[in-house]
Amino acid sequence: MNLNQITIPSVNLEKAIVFYQTLGLKLIVHSNAHYARFVCPDGTSTFSIQLVDELPSGNGVHIYFECEELDVYVNELKTKGIEFFEEPNDKPWLWREAHLYDLDRNHLILYYAGENRLNPPWRLKDVE
């Protein structure tokens, strides 16, 4: 099994499309002004947005995008007007992360984990 895509809600699809294109995702589907799908710039994962009348309440969605040159990428995005509420920093779980919100207040984490993404020192030994 492989994860194909994540779909998130948005109350303004057109603005959300521009935001995610600014992050570097490539728009591959835009249908009926209710749905848009992107392919990530690295790999084959896709990411989609569906127009909704109202956003869900509560903590919402947390979306992680891995970036090898995290600090460089964050600086590039800042020059394009993207605002971060947490600058890149090293976490105790051995990932480097930067945090921001999209226009619908979905929590985005840009990170780099390298080998520790799938193989942290505390990984269960019997998992292949």
Image (tube, rainbow, N blue to C red):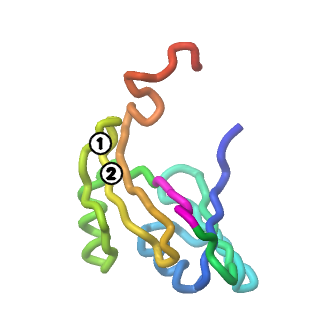
Q: Mark 1 points at which residue?
A: 91
Q: In this view, does 127 lie above or below 73?
A: above
Q: Is mark 1 on a helix, strand or loop?
A: loop
Q: Which amino acid does label 1 sit on?
A: Lys
Q: Residue 97 carries which label?
A: 2
Identify which residue, 66 or 27, lies in the foreground: 66
Magenta span has 59? yes
Inter-mark Cα distance, 2 to 1: 7 Å
Q: Is residue 68 above or below residue 29?
A: above
Q: Residues within 10 Å of mark 2 (few under 14, many from 20)?
A: many
Q: Is residue 10 above or below residue 116?
A: below
Q: Is mark 2 on a helix, strand or loop?
A: strand
User: Are the residues flagged by discs 2 and 1 in contact, CB closer than 8 Å?
Assistant: yes
Seen at 51% across and 57% down, the residue is 62
Seen at 38% across and 22% down, the residue is 121
Quarter-of-image position of residue 50:
bottom right
Quarter-of-image position of residue 33:
bottom right
- Specify start and end residues of the magenta stretch as a single range: 58-64
Instruction: Please state, as top left, top right, bottom left or bottom right, where the N terminus lies in the image.
Output: top right
